[in-house]
Amino acid sequence: MNRIGVYMEQWLIRRATQHDVAAVLALFDEAIAWFGEIENQGQWGTEAWSTQPHQIARISEACALPGAWVAEDQTGRVQGALILGEAMPYVPPASEPEVYVRVLISSRDPQARGLGRSLLDFAEGQARRAGVQQLRVDCYGGGTGALVRFYESCGYERLATFQVDDWPGQLLGRRLPV
């Protein structure tokens, strides 16, 4: 297993591999169960992703991307994932070079509190290394709006809304200072 990566706070952030697919799917399963508890089934539905062949394939493809990263705690347990890459096809194209956050997920474990922000900070570092000043992300725009507010609290601004079938989305962006 490749354990070479970047340490941020208590996290080892390293490139994802196919060996991480099950752990990333488990993060989605955990989030879906939690969304069910808070009655937010609109984001990813109610069925565990680890039981859906198309979601397994989706996460397998994502973990193979060059911008796929996972965050491990001190015990080596994957507690979060970040996938950077091309913008999703359902959002308006960027007007300048960018780093696009395709996936951001972290465990509901209390020890993982703050990991999402740490991964977004890591994405900012990747953008700076690439000489890019724009980051964008899309997220579920329905429910209580808590996810949109989370990204806003991380310095992202609302850019556009969109709809994918009956799924309401919000595109957000952040400009890095020169």
Image (cartoon, rainbow, N blue to C red):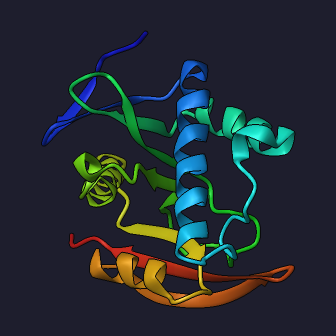
Specify the quadrant of the image occupied by residue 86: bottom right
State left or right for residue 158 relative to residue 177.
right
Specify the quadrant of the image occupied by residue 63: top right
State left or right for residue 98 relative to residue 29.
left
As drawn, 146 above or below 37: below
What x and y, as percent, mark residue 103?
54, 54
What x and y, as percent, mark residue 79?
38, 40
State left or right for residue 127 relative to residue 23.
left
**40 or 16, which lies in front?**
40
State left or right for residue 167 relative to residue 37.
right
Task: For residue 102, say whether it is visible.
Answer: no
Q: Quadrant of the C terminus?
A: bottom left
Specify the quadrant of the image occupied by residue 152: bottom left
**76 or 159, which lies in front?**
76
Q: Quadrant of the N terminus?
A: top left
What x and y, as percent, mark residue 120?
33, 58
Task: For residue 66, say whether it is visible.
Answer: yes
Q: Residue at x 25, y 22 (%)?
A: 75
Residue at the outermost left position: 9
Q: Residue at x 58, y 57 (%)?
A: 33
**60 or 160, which lies in front?**
60
As drawn, 123 above or below 90: above
